[in-house]
Image: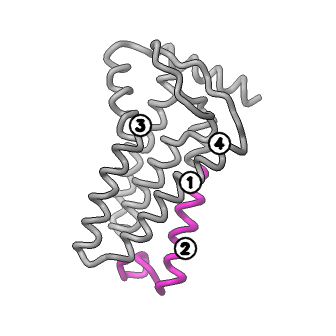
């Protein structure tokens, strides 16, 4: 069932292709590249440290670095071959499941909200936009199957929840209880 679902959804998404959308999806996908997230992550950590929120900096780093490590380990466990890319793009190296862009971008933007402004509910919507766009771009460009992206998001949600809960246990009531990290 999964291969049929994946292929049907890939073709449905690909049927919407046009040059402007392809250019936009390539740009969005770049946001999830390791070099971009590392550079942004350094800025986030510096911000947290300068704001006197070292605990948030450490938890953010654990969430994002741990997500990257999980991605690499799970790719080795599942060994899922990648689909053929669209638009003549080079085939990415490595295995397909889970989508590293989906997993790590979810952990990055999710951790940013959870550890920076958890009381601001609309920030979660703002974080969901790049997460969804990056995931969609990976399917649109043919870099991943839809279930690679969905799996990446699910793994990231569980991982980030674990990091958050561990942070609460180590530090009292945590950000949702009125105190910030």
Residue that badge 3 annotates: 133
Residue that badge 1 annotates: 69
Highlighted magenta segment, given as a residue range: 154-181
Q: Residues within 10 Å of mark 3 (few under 14, many from 20)?
A: some
Residue that badge 4 annotates: 75
171 or 76, which is in the foreground? 76
Task: Give how far apart the Cα atoms at labels 4 and 2 are.
Answer: 26 Å
In-image side of 79 versus 15 (left or right): right
Residue at the bottom extreme, as displayed = 172
What label sits on residue 165 in the rendered view?
2
126 or 95, which is in the foreground? 95
146 or 91, which is in the foreground? 91
The residue under the point 48% across, 20% down is 90
Of mark 4 and mark 2, the one earlier in the sequence is: 4
Of mark 4 and mark 1, the one earlier in the sequence is: 1
Task: Give how far apart the Cα atoms at labels 1 and 3 are.
Answer: 22 Å
Quadrant position of residue 23: top left
Is 156 magenta? The answer is: yes
| Residue contact between numbered discs 1 and 3, judged by CB atoms under 8 Å | no
Of mark 1 and mark 3, the one earlier in the sequence is: 1
Is 180 magenta? The answer is: yes
| Residue contact between numbered discs 1 and 2, judged by CB atoms under 8 Å | no
Of mark 1 and mark 2, the one earlier in the sequence is: 1
């Amino acid at each position: 069932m999964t291969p049929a679902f994946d292929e049907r959804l890939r073709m449905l998404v690909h049927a919407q292709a046009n040059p402007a959308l392809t250019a936009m999806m390539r740009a969005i996908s770049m946001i999830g590249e390791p070099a971009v997230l590392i550079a942004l992550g350094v800025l986030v950590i510096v911000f947290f440290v300068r704001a006197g929120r070292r605990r948030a900096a450490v938890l953010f780093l654990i969430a994002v670095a741990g997500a990257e490590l999980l991605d690499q380990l799970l790719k080795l466990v599942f060994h899922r071959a990648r689909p053929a890319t669209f638009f003549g793009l080079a085939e990415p190296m490595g295995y397909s499941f889970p989508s590293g862009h989906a997993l790590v971008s979810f952990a990055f933007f999710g951790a940013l909200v959870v550890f920076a402004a958890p009381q601001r509910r609309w920030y979660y919507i703002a974080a969901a936009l790049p997460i969804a766009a990056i995931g969609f771009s990976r399917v649109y460009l043919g870099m991943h199957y839809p279930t690679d992206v969905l799996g990446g998001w699910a793994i990231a949600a569980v991982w980030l929840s674990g990091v958050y809960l561990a942070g609460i246990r180590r530090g009292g009531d945590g950000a949702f209880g009125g105190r910030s990290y």
